[in-house]
Image: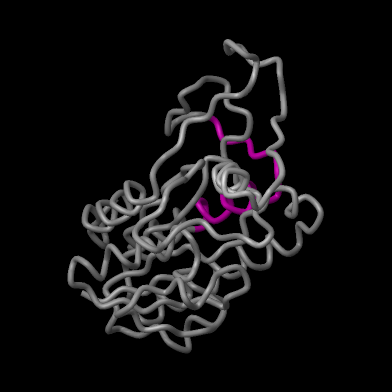
């Protein structure tokens, strides 16, 4: 089968693209390289440098589905520049859905976020927990979730939104790479490699033995498998 991976030059998107190729699928990566890297596009994938807003230029009926990762994802930046997140995350997805509708591509896996839940009332967070995002980033992803739901109901799109956070690890040569880097595990490794003097720990009043925060992580390879399972589970026209 043939799949379009938007944002496939980024961290999670590149690993998902690699998994698709390993399964024998044809893969086209669409990425504007604003946060991704051309060298992260897996060998064997076709690469198109462009914005998701212009997906209609390349998307046609030869594709069996889309895996959508093209989004800005920095919470702090979204507070300072909310318009950037609405324009790209929401506007870009709206254009992508229109292109899919026009081309007759009826399967979509959307890389959403657990930031849609905001400050959860209970942990672990269940899928049915109330959504209350606390940043424009989380709000933009929740808006896209609703947008996709409407597309499914009105036009028979088969779609799955995966809400996750705290992704870590590498897959072969593919790993985390951000500029500037803001993720904890890469920062810790930079200290170990002597590239950074120290790591900052924020908070000392958590209910843990030393008062510092404890996080759970999902390995990027396991997350990629979840995306492929979601893709296999859906049937266009069904709910």
Residue 26 painted magenta = no
Residue at 26% x, 73% y is: 64
Which residue occupies the foreground of this view, 100 or 77?
Answer: 77
Q: Residue at x 61, y 11 (%)?
A: 207
Where residue 7 appears, as percent x and y from the top left, is 49, 69
Residue farthest along the bottom direction in this orientation = 57
**Which residue corresponds to the image point at 31% horizontal and 73% vertical from the top-left?**
3
Name the residue furthest left.
Answer: 24
x 27%, y 66%: residue: 20
Q: Is residue 42 left or right of residue 205?
A: left
Residue at the far front: name it: 194
Residue 174 against residue 105 in the figure, above or below: above
Q: Is residue 89 above or below residue 102?
A: above
The way the protein has been coloured in the rendering is: one colour
Residue 135: x and y in percent read 70, 44
Which of the 4 quarters of the picture holds residue 188?
top right
State which region is magenta.
130-147
* Tally of numbered discs: 0
Q: Quadrant of residue 235?
A: bottom left
Indicate left or right for 200 with 53 as reference. Answer: right
Q: Quick check: 163 above or below 30?
A: above
Horizontal side, residue 70 vs residue 100: left or right: right
- In the image, residue 36 sits, relative to residue 192, either above or below, namely below
Q: Which sits in the foreground, 40 or 71?
A: 40
**Where the N terminus falls, by quadrant?**
bottom left
For the stretch drawn in magenta, what is the main secondary structure? helix
Instruction: Please state the horizontal and vertical placement of residue 34, each as a whole percent of the image.
Output: 63, 73
Residue 193, given in percent of the width and then of the height, sits at 57, 49
């Amino acid at each position: 089968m043939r799949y379009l991976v938007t944002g496939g030059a980024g961290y999670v998107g590149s690993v998902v693209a690699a998994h698709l190729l390993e399964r024998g699928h044809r893969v086209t990566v669409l990425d504007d390289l604003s946060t991704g890297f051309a060298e992260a596009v897996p060998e064997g994938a076709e690469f198109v440098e462009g914005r998701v807003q212009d997906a209609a230029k390349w998307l046609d009926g030869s594709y069996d589905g889309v895996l959508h990762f093209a989004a800005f994802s920095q919470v702090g930046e979204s507070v300072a520049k909310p318009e950037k997140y609405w324009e790209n995350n929401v506007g870009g997805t709206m254009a992508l859905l229109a292109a899919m509708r026009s081309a007759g591509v009826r399967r979509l896996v959307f890389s959403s976020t657990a930031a849609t839940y905001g400050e959860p009332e209970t942990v672990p967070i269940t899928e049915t927990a109330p959504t209350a995002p606390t940043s424009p980033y989380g709000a933009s992803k929740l808006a896209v979730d609703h947008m996709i739901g409407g597309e499914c109901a009105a036009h028979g799109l088969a779609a799955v939104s995966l809400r996750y956070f705290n992704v870590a690890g590498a897959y072969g040569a593919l790993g985390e790479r951000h500029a500037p880097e803001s993720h904890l595990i890469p920062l810790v490794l930079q200290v170990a490699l002597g590239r950074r003097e120290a790591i900052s720990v924020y908070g000392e009043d958590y209910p843990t033995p030393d008062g510092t925060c404890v996080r759970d992580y999902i390995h990027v390879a396991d997350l990629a498998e979840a995306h492929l399972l979601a893709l296999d589970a859906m049937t266009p026209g069904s709910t």
